[in-house]
Amino acid sequence: MYATDRSASGRSSGGPGTMSSIHAGRALIVSITDHTLHGEDDEGAGALVTELLSEAGFVVDGSVAVPSDTVAIRTALNTAVIGGVDLVVTVGGTGVSPRDVTPDVTAEVIDRELPGIAQALRWSGMAAGVTDAVVSRGLVGVSGSTLVANIAGSRAAIRDGMATLNPLAVHVIQELSDPEI
């Protein structure tokens, strides 16, 4: 389901600045919300991230909603990484409440942290006045050849965070898939 052909760059030859004309990579969205415990959906977070990733040239393999539970989050992240997606975007569970465990689980899954990207997400949130993006404990890092990024769960944080993350993700994925590096 998440197979990726990394033998070539996988990117089409669109001109400079034509992000929607390139194949930036394969992505999976993991929405962390306790609404799933009550049979509810993720309030459109997965659909919004899917739209923003697609606009940036990503092929979105799917969106899954899991409760704010360590085991459920770890299983979703490991499944995506083992499945070979280029990018996993988690949405929600990055705050300071006791149930916000997404960054803690992400730290266990990633091999290398990319603190500059996580800081860029917080700084852009601060500039846009998105409070939950600023207080987010979200991490960004690499697990194997998969980029994993935590985004705060509000619609404003998603829109602002994805605008910051998309070009950085494309760059990191290109570096990870370059056999010369």
Image: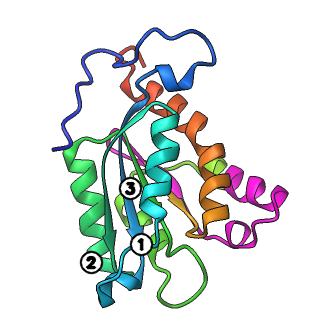
Q: Residue at x 64, y 70 (%)?
A: 136
Q: Secondary structure at mark 1?
A: loop
Residue 63 got which mark? Answer: none
Q: Decide: few, some or many residues near mark 1? Use Cα within 10 Å; few <14, some 14-19, many ≥20.
A: many
Residue type of the residue flagged with mark 2: Val
| Quadrant of the rendered image containing residue 27 | top left
Q: Which residues are magenta?
A: 119-147
User: Splitting the image into 4 quarters, where does residue 30 fall?
Assistant: bottom left
Give the quarter of the figure containing the N terminus.
top left
Sequence-earlier tag: 1 or 3: 3
Dividing the image into 4 quarters, which one contains the C terminus? Answer: top left
User: Residue 66 in the image: x percent, y percent?
Assistant: 32, 74
Provide the residue designation for mark 2.
71
Q: Is label 2 in a helix, a strand or a loop?
A: helix
Residue 144 covered by magenta stretch: yes
Q: Amino acid at mark 3?
A: Ile
Rendered residue at 37%/66% (across/down): 108
Taking 107 as reference, is 10 above or below it? above
Residue 42's label in the rendered image is: 1
Quarter residue 23 falls in: top left
Kindly identify which residue carries mark 3.
Answer: 29
Q: Residues within 10 Å of mark 2 (few under 14, many from 20)?
A: few
Near-viewer residue (121 or 130): 130
Q: CA distance from mark 3 to mark 2?
A: 17 Å
Q: Amino acid at mark 1?
A: Asp
Task: Measure how far apart labels 1 and 3 are at the Cα level.
Answer: 11 Å
In the rendered structure, the answer to whether residue 3 lies left or right of residue 102 reads left
Q: Is residue 12 above or below residue 173?
A: above
Q: Are marks 1 and 2 in contact (CB under 8 Å)?
A: no
